[in-house]
Image: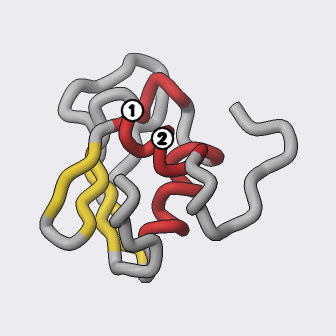
């Protein structure tokens, strides 16, 4: 994933299955993939992120990929201090 463009537009698609008693995330579009990744990791409950999909430049990334992109040394935004 070293060629990943964090500045490209991105779309975040929710998981198909529903988690009881939790508000599911809906489809969201972001101007930058880095913003989508930060939202997914820092704002979405981990159980809701499982099965979600990030699409950037017509490539799809699953929840494990999203976490790796967030933890990459190439990630351009500041991370939350406490993190998940």
Residue 54 versus residue 41 in the image, above or below: below
Color encoding of the figure: secondary structure
Residue 77, horizontal then vertical, whole percent: 68, 67
Residue count near mark 2 (Cα–Cα under 10 Å), binned few <14, some 14–19, many ≥20: some
Residue 20 versus residue 77 in the image, above or below: above
Which residue is under mark 2? 68
Q: Secondary structure at mark 2?
A: helix
Residue in the picture at 22% in, 25% down: 17
Q: Secondary structure at mark 1?
A: helix
Residue count near mark 1 (Cα–Cα under 10 Å), binned few <14, some 14–19, many ≥20: some
Residue 16 versus residue 55 in the image, above or below: above
Given contact means CB atoms under 8 Å apart, are the residues at marks 2 and 1 in contact? yes
Front-most of residues 64 and 47: 64
Q: Is 8 on the left-hand or right-hand side of 46? A: left
Front-most of residues 67 and 39: 67
Residue in the picture at 47% in, 20% down: 21
> On the image, which quarter does residue 78 sit in?
bottom right
Residue in the picture at 57% in, 61% down: 74
Q: Furthest residue to the front?
A: 2
Q: Is 23 on the left-hand or right-hand side of 29? A: right
Front-most of residues 29 and 74: 74
Residue 29, horizontal then vertical, whole percent: 35, 71
Q: Furthest residue to the top?
A: 20
Q: Furthest residue to the left?
A: 58
Q: Which mark is residue 32?
A: none
Which residue is under mark 1? 64
Residue 68 versus residue 19 in the image, above or below: below
Instruction: Measure how far apart labels 2 and 1 are at the Cα level.
Output: 6 Å
Locate the C terminus by quadrant. top right
Residue in the picture at 84% in, 37% down: 82
């Amino acid at each position: 994933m070293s060629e990943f463009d964090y500045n490209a537009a991105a779309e975040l698609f929710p998981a198909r299955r529903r988690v009881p008693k939790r508000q599911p995330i809906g489809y969201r579009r972001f101007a930058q993939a880095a913003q989508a990744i930060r939202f997914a990791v820092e704002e979405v409950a981990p159980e809701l992120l499982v099965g979600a999909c990030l699409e950037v430049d017509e490539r799809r990334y699953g929840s494990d990929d999203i976490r790796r992109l967030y933890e990459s040394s190439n990630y351009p935004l500041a991370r939350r201090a406490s993190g998940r």
